[in-house]
Amino acid sequence: MRMRVYHIYTRAGSRFHFGATAVDNLTGLASGTGHMPSDSLFSALVNCLAKYDGEMTERLIGMFDSKRVSVSSVFYFLEKEGNRVYFLPKPVDASNRVDEKAGVRAKEVKKVRFVSKGILDRYGADWAKHFGEFVYVGSSALALAEEIGRGELRHLKRLYATGTATHVNTRPHSGEEATELYETAYMALPEHGDGWETGMYFLCDTDGLADVERKLFDFAVRLLRFEGLGGKRSSGYGFVDRVEEGTEAFDTGASDTYLSLGLCVPENAGELGRFEAYELCVRGGRHIGSAVRLKRVNMIREGALLSGGGGPLGSCVDVSPDGEGSYLRLGICLVYPLGVGEG
């Protein structure tokens, strides 16, 4: 199987809000994930299409629910003159594989959030044992020296920036004061020097689709340019300049170990047993009325390590308050084979 890649371009400095689960309406905006999770990308694609045709929307949801199409979370790449360096989520057990006697400190590895595709293709799950060979992009991303020459680092800032903006709550929910202040967490793509640019991308597996279904999926993806990504778009967040399909190969050959590229809710005990190292997060729970919330669900984060073959795996989860199926969370994830890109 070969995964397709879509590049998302935006202007340097553009802000995006990708929310995290929180206890109430105000604090929900004050934290973010730093990148767009796969369940939020699924929601964005569905909502884009829902504005145009309800029947097509139901077909798209069915394509995801049957695992005939799958998407990753949205990650980052660096680009200069057409050459791209892709970054993938750090494997969750990286700190446990460090040999501190060799001079690599576990707390340094903990700070890293993303590692380049080149690192994982070459070294696989044991990449942290070669920590000294890599170069930093900011403080949270690593790449091979041949992917980004050490002389180029002076032109690069961090892979992405995060911050908070303060607002006045002018449209409160019941029990909240109209003058109450709240904060919105955001991430932004920085402006680099010497022609470098940060972009976002996601992977998708459409091998199981018929031609007409693939065209429907591609149409939903193209709509992202007009509808944007993430929340707070009415406040100027989430604007996208263009979305383009790439030609790079993300082949998924056989490996002993795989990396999860999206949020996952295993469909059964057999799928759960494939996860060798993972972290959980809570998704859902937002207000859909003054006193009504969606259900919350535990999901396995990106960066989990698996054995036992490829994917996708997982299931869609009904988070509707009364279980009637009107609100779904995508818990189906793609997986990427580690250590097979280079000999």
Image (cartoon, rainbow, N blue to C red):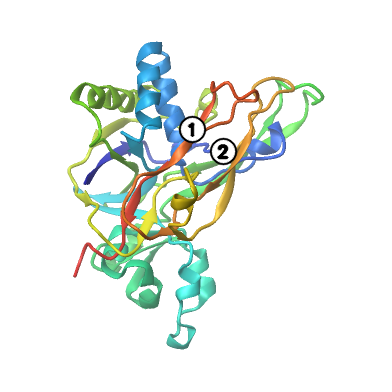
Q: Position of residue 289 (x, y in %)?
A: 68, 20
Q: Position of residue 68 (x, y in %)?
A: 31, 33
Q: Are marks 2 and 1 in contact (CB under 8 Å)?
A: yes
At a point 24% along the width and 27% down the height, the residue shown is 214
Does residue 196 lie above or below 208 as drawn? below
Does residue 309 lie above or below 225 as drawn? below
Does residue 330 appear in this view?
A: no
Q: Is residue 244 left or right of residue 230?
A: left
Reading the image, the residue beneath label 2 is 19
Marking on residue 230: 1
**Picture quarter with the C terminus:** bottom left
Label 2 SS: loop
Q: Position of residue 140 (x, y in %)?
A: 46, 60
Q: Amino acid at mark 2?
A: Gly
Q: Is residue 122 left or right of residue 29?
A: left
At a point 72% along the width and 35% down the height, the residue shown is 24
